[in-house]
Amino acid sequence: MFLPWIAAQFEMNDRTARKMMEVAEVFGTKWNHGSDLNASATYELAAPSKPQAVRDAVEELLVYGQKVTVADIRRYERRKLLRIKLKDGRDAGHALIREGLARVWPDNWGNRWCDR
């Protein structure tokens, strides 16, 4: 009953409807629909198998105005990330960027050779 209604009202198939429901379950009302994340990347990020740490990291990139693709999300999931905290608990990377001592890499991920 539900899926025929979805198809009639929104002209979408079962798979798309389920992916959209996953997005709603994961992000709820906090999801920024105007972000630079396309539909495929949004679905990838909302997949039940996606670790929360990856979601948090991608959300952070979006805050800085970075464009993120499905390939970027998958690459980020394979990376081992280390967070360095200052004595006062602040993230060292954020502090360096705020103080003008570092910057966000253009193209999202820095040097491509680092992924090898």
Image (spheres, helix red, strand yellow):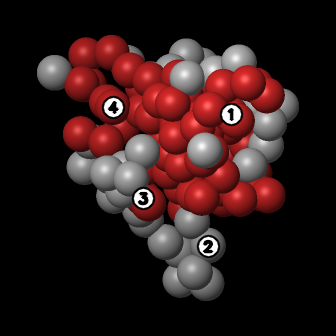
Of label 3 and label 1, which has the lower sequence position? 1
83 left or right of 112 in image: right
Which residue in the protein does label 2 denote?
A: 90
Of label 3 and label 2, which has the lower sequence position? 3
The alpha-carbon separation of the residues under discs 4 and 2 comes to 27 Å
6 left or right of 18 in image: right
Look at the numbered disc 3 and give the secondary structure of its residue.
helix
Q: Residues within 10 Å of mark 4 (few under 14, many from 20)?
A: some
Mark 2: amino acid: Arg
The alpha-carbon separation of the residues under discs 1 and 4 comes to 30 Å
Residue at screen point 68% across, 34% down: 6
Front one among 99 and 65: 65
Mark number displayed over residue 6: 1
Mark 1: amino acid: Ile
Which residue in the protein does label 4 denote?
A: 74
The quarter of the picture where residue 16 lies is top right
Mark 4: amino acid: Arg
The residue sitting at the left extreme is 116
